[in-house]
Image (tube, rainbow, N blue to C red):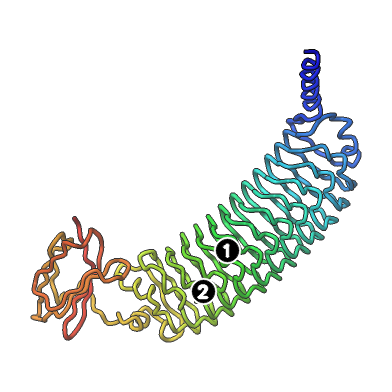
Amino acid sequence: MKKLLLFVLAIHFTLITIHCISQPCLPEGITFTTQSQIDNFQINYPNCTEVEGDMIISGGDITNLTPLNVLTSVGGSLTIESNSNLASLSGLNSLSHLGGSLLIYENNNMINLTGIDNLTTVDSSLYIGYNNNLINLFGLTNLTTVGASTVIEDNQTLNNFTGLDQLTSIGEYFIVRSNDSLINFSGIGNLLTIGGDVMIWANDELIDLYGIANLNYIGGDLSFIHNFSIQNFSGLENLDSIGGYLWIENNSLTSFHGLNNLRSIGDFISISTNPYLSDISALINLNSVRIIGIYHNDNLTSLFGLDSISAGSIDTLSIFDNSLLTTCEVRSICNFLINPSSVFEIDDNAPGCNSQQEVKEACGIFGIEDIINKNEFHIYPNPAMDKLTISSKNGLSIEAVVIYDQLGQIVMQIKGIGENIDISTLGQGIYIIELTTSELKNRRKLVIKK
């Protein structure tokens, strides 16, 4: 019995000791502006291991963070900024969790982030900017999740993302901007999803996107703008869908290679001011996009690559000022132009794609007269339900009737008809009906209501 009592007492005192040496503190946060404040931290705040508020480290004479090695978490944000003499984050090695953001900027003596190697989660945002001698991101090796946004910008010597090897998801947007030495995305190979926008802008030496090969989903917009060295999108081969828009504008881009498996874009695709772009064939698996804008691409000759887009997903089309573009009659564009209510602008391209009429002619639909204007036939009732009556005003004999759905697909085809057509098998919706005689074709909108 005495031994049992001693055992219980031992456990009790152990728990008391653990509580004493590991406890939250500083709900209002703490700011370090001098090395002496850091040196005296454990004296001034004994047993403090979990800062409840924000922690800021910002001071020109700060060189050593070792006295902070007792800290295991920060409940708010951790800001490390304007430390001109701080070369290493060693001393933060026990830190595993941040309840807020991690902001590291304007630390010009820092070449990597070694010292926060045990950090696994950042609940809010990650910001790394204006660290002029930062070469890589070593030190973030165990970081798996950023709950909100990640911004990496204006780090003049950063050439890759080595150190972010375990990062799998970014909750909101991902911005990579104005990193003048960045050549690829090596070091971020386990990133699978990004919940918000991706902005890759003005990274002058970026030549490809190798290193981000497992990314398959972007919840927001994807924009590649003014990356002057990138020639294609190698490295994005697993990207399947973009929730928002895709905006491409890069001076050296020659092809869309790398986006071969992209299947859907939720909003618009804008391909503009890419003077060396000659090939968009890698977009051949794209099947859904709402708005297409293609303009100011001086070397683009063909729209081959847009063939698989469902015409029913498109509501606006703009193709202009592509001086060598002659081939616009791909399937998706032709099917879209069949719809009389289409909203489109086609002009100032090369012959063959220089106007709406030229594209329609290349598609085989130029010269099809609109029955609304010519009235060679009466088609009624319209809207219709189960039967449709067609009569000729000028005694023309109808050789065939073809009805298309909004995707441009044939849903009914009849030859040698009389006056009445049974349309009871067609569902409610808007269709295009095409009447063919020996002299002409006419098309008009047909509405079916059930």
- Give the residue furthest to the top: 1
The amino acid beneath tag 1 is Ser
Q: Residues within 10 Å of mark 1 (few under 14, many from 20)?
A: some
Residue drawn at point x = 71 percent, y = 71 percent: 205
Q: Residue at x 22, y 59 (%)?
A: 427
The image quadrant where one finds the N terminus is top right
Give the foreground label among 2 and 1: 2
In the rendered image, residue 294, in percent from the top left (x then y), is placed at 48, 73
Q: Secondary structure at mark 1?
A: strand
- The residue indicated by pointer 2 is 282
Marker disc for residue 108: none
User: Label 2: few (<14), some or many (≥20) within 10 Å?
Assistant: some
In this rendering, position of residue 133 left or right of residue 197? right
The percent coordinates of residue 68 (x first, y second) are 84, 39
The tag earlier along the polypeptide, 2 or 1, is: 1
**Closest to the observer, 46 or 16:** 16
Circle 2: residue type: Ala
Q: Could you tell me how far apart the alpha carbons at marks 2 and 1 are, in whole angstroms?
A: 17 Å
Q: Which residue is mark 1?
A: 223
Label 2 element class: helix
Residue 206 position (above or below residue 28): below
User: On the rendered structure, is 274 left or right of 60?
Assistant: left
- Name the residue located 66 percent from the left edge and 50 percent from the top edge: 144
- The quadrant of the rendering that contains the C terminus is bottom left
Q: Quadrant of residue 399?
A: bottom left
